[in-house]
């Protein structure tokens, strides 16, 4: 069973562009990426779109569908009405390269700013031991496919370009939290999260969790616990007094 679907797709580059209307065949069981590929094959061979696995695991085909950040390959056409006009636009937070492709190098810059896992110096590779409960605590964070939809929807950078230098975004604050939770990591991630990655700018609206295709509870399980640790260290008067009395850093 098929029908003629109505689409509005953003076309252009860093110098400008706009939405163009298309009518494309839609077949049962298809996802939005299928329609974009059919559009390339039949009407717009120069349409630029980034994709790779078409299985929701590479994170390449991130875009905005009817204004909501989504993966093109995981958004089924069956969730829309046949009479509905579906708008497909590039991620708004990042600079346009062409059509649906954006420059996400901001995220790789922030990734390099997170120091890697720092195990105790007296432990050799193969000697690491940790309890299963500690493994499970941060296991969900390792499901991240780095689609950067959480980065795109976070209004701290989406609506305030000036924050990009000081704020790493939910994906990399989650990485800092994951390392802080690791019982064998010796680096001090608490001050780092606040002072270098801008944790204080996050006001926990949970929009990052809402768009995560892996259903990671970024805010509840990573960002809020990290904020609590920062608050304990920097603002708890008992902790402050203990640090002064016992000269703890």
Image (cartoon, rainbow, N blue to C red):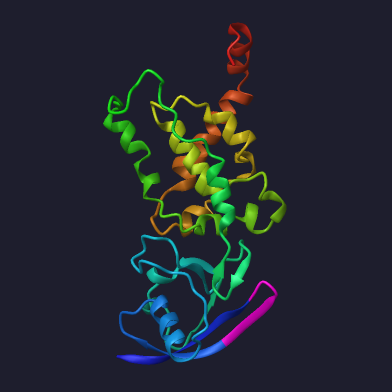
Rendered residue at 41%/59% (across/down): 213
Rendered residue at 63%/58% (across/down): 158
Residue furthest top in the image: 245
Q: Picture coordinates of residue 230 (x, y %)? A: 57, 30
Residue furthest right in the image: 162
Q: Nearer the viewer, residue 80 or 214?
A: 214
Q: Picture coordinates of residue 189 (x, y %)? A: 53, 30
Q: Is residue 113 above or below residue 87?
A: above
Q: In the rendered image, which quarter is residue 235 located in?
A: top right
185 inside magenta stretch? no
Q: In the rendered image, which quarter is residue 31 located in?
A: bottom left
Rendered residue at 31%/28% (across/down): 125
Q: Is residue 13 above or below residue 241?
A: below
Quarter containing the N terminus: bottom left
19 inside magenta stretch? yes
What type of secondary structure mainly makes up the magenta span?
A: strand
The number of discs equals 0
Q: Picture coordinates of residue 74 (x, y %)? A: 38, 68
Rendered residue at 53%/42% (across/down): 173
Q: Which residues are magenta?
A: 13-20
Q: Picture coordinates of residue 166 (x, y %)? A: 67, 44
């Amino acid at each position: 069973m098929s029908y003629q679907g109505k689409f509005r797709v953003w076309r252009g580059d860093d110098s400008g562009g706009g939405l163009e209307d298309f009518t494309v065949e839609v077949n049962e069981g298809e996802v939005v990426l299928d329609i974009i590929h059919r559009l390339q094959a039949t009407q717009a061979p120069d349409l630029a779109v980034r994709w790779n696995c078409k299985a929701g695991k590479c994170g390449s085909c991130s875009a905005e569908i009817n204004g909501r950040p989504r993966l093109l390959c995981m958004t089924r056409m069956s969730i829309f009405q046949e009479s509905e006009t579906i708008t497909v636009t590039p991620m708004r937070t990042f600079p346009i390269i062409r059509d649906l492709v954006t420059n996400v190098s901001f995220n790789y810059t922030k990734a390099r700013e997170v120091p890697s896992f720092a195990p105790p110096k007296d432990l050799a590779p193969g000697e690491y031991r940790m309890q299963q409960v500690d493994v499970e605590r941060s296991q969900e964070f390792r499901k991240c496919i780095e689609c950067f939809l959480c980065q795109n929807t976070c209004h701290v950078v989406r609506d305030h370009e000036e924050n990009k230098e000081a704020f790493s975004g939910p994906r990399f604050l989650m990485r800092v939290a994951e390392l802080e939770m690791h019982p064998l990591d010796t680096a001090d991630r608490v001050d780092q999260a606040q002072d270098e990655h801008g944790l204080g700018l996050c006001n926990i609206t949970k929009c990052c969790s809402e768009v995560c295709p892996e259903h990671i509870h970024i805010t509840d399980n990573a960002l809020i616990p990290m904020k609590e640790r920062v608050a304990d260290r920097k603002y708890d008067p008992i902790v402050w007094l203990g640090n002064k009395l016992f000269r703890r850093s």
